[in-house]
Image (spheres, rainbow, N blue to C red):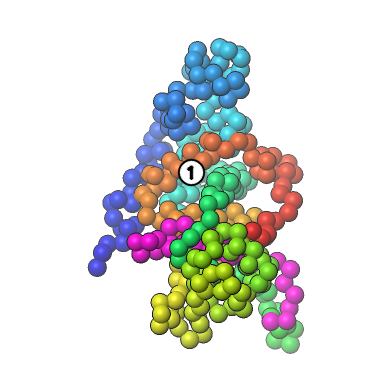
Amino acid sequence: MAQHFLLSSRARKLSLMQIAKMSDSEAVKAFADIRWHSNGGNPICPNCGNTSKIYLITTRNEYKCNECHKRFSVTSETLFHSHKLPLQTLLCAIVLFVNAVKGISALQLSRDLDIQYKSAFVLLHKLRESLIDYQSDEPFSGVCEIDGVYVGNYIRPKNNINDRIDMRKAFKPNKRVVISLRQRDELGSGANKSRTFILKSENTFDINNIVCKHILRGSEVHTDENVGYSDLSAYYTHKVVNHAVEYMGSGGENNNQSESYNARFRRLEYGQCHKLSVLYLSNYANKISYREDTRRLDNGAIFKDILGKCLNKPISNEFCGYWQGNHRVNERLGA
């Protein structure tokens, strides 16, 4: 039997100890090499775009542009703009985020790095935000799978049995379903592309909108027996597996890759965060989607990818000043 990827040395290319032992200059270089990769790691002024005659102020780890005379650092005008934490701490946070394949909670990160819960909460959300903003819009094709996993539908039962309500009839305002759309790899090694959407239910109208927008017509789509997917046969080769009877049909019809996503998402919900806000549910869902798509990459490659996304993303509109009241107003629903 082949060795699991996470058990192999190929999965381990970066350790937390490597980052923790970095000096200030090494941390600055790590940021600079990724942020200004196109310029060989040499600074580019974020204000005027100047690439020459930029001087390093070694006492502050800042740069000064000789053209516009502005000062900037390796994190200026990025997701980490105006950060208070040391660069080594930010890098350690990304390593912990990368190595936690089923997610990590803000409380755990605050204990691991000895930082305030508020700092850990915002930092993790910024990392998740960097992932959701770099999603590809390229439509899926070939063989695709769809499934949904419900969250926010649990009501704690009363102590006395006479006071308990029928959970099937109870109104659940925060009940949502995470729809996972996955494209199978042509070589048969699972799914290679994933996309997630948040709905209030698996209804035909929203499902049709998602599928028509994100899957090329004529593709093969595998789903379970839920009636929300019943109209897909109009434009797609629709194959259905009845989960009340079997996991895979006699003709190979299954949505096991979407079920794999659901399993990892449940580990995040039950084992790490325990409660997911509907306001930022799309960020959590996309984070698990990213982990599924990068499951066969080593942690060093994932680290560089996430750090690069953070350094190429401008200042966050939703989490810069979060604890001063700058919150997302509406949840992200639909396609």
Tell me where residue 1 appears, x and y as whole percent.
24, 68
Tell me where residue 323 appears, x and y as whole percent.
70, 44
Residue 174 falls in image quadrant: bottom right
Left or right: residue 152 versus residue 194 is right
Instruction: Find out whether residue 148 is within the magenta segment.
Output: no
Tell me where residue 57 appears, x and y as whole percent.
51, 16
Q: Which residue occupies the foreground of this view, 41 or 146?
A: 146
Left or right: residue 125 versus residue 333 is left
Instruction: Find out whether residue 171 is within the magenta segment.
Output: yes
Q: Is residue 8 above or below residue 80?
A: below
Tell me where residue 224 appears, x and y as whole percent.
53, 76
Q: For the point 38% across and 35% down, which residue is it?
A: 21
* Magenta part of the chain: 168-196
Residue at image mark 1: 306
Q: Is residue 27 visible?
A: no
Left or right: residue 19 versus residue 331 is left
Under mark 1, the amino acid is Ile
Q: How many marks?
A: 1
Mark 1 surroundings: few (<14), some (14-19) or many (≥20) residues within 10 A: some
Q: Which residue occupies the foreground of this view, 219 or 136?
A: 219
Left or right: residue 51 versus residue 279 is left
Q: Secondary structure at mark 1?
A: helix
Residue 100 falls in image quadrant: bottom left
Q: For the point 45% across and 56% down, which residue is it?
A: 293
Q: Is residue 228 above or below residue 22?
A: below
Single out the residue that lies furthest toward the left: 1
Q: Is residue 206 visible?
A: yes
Q: For the point 61% across and 17% down, which residue is it?
A: 70
Q: For the point 43% across and 81% down, which residue is it?
A: 249
The quadrant in which the C terminus is found is bottom right
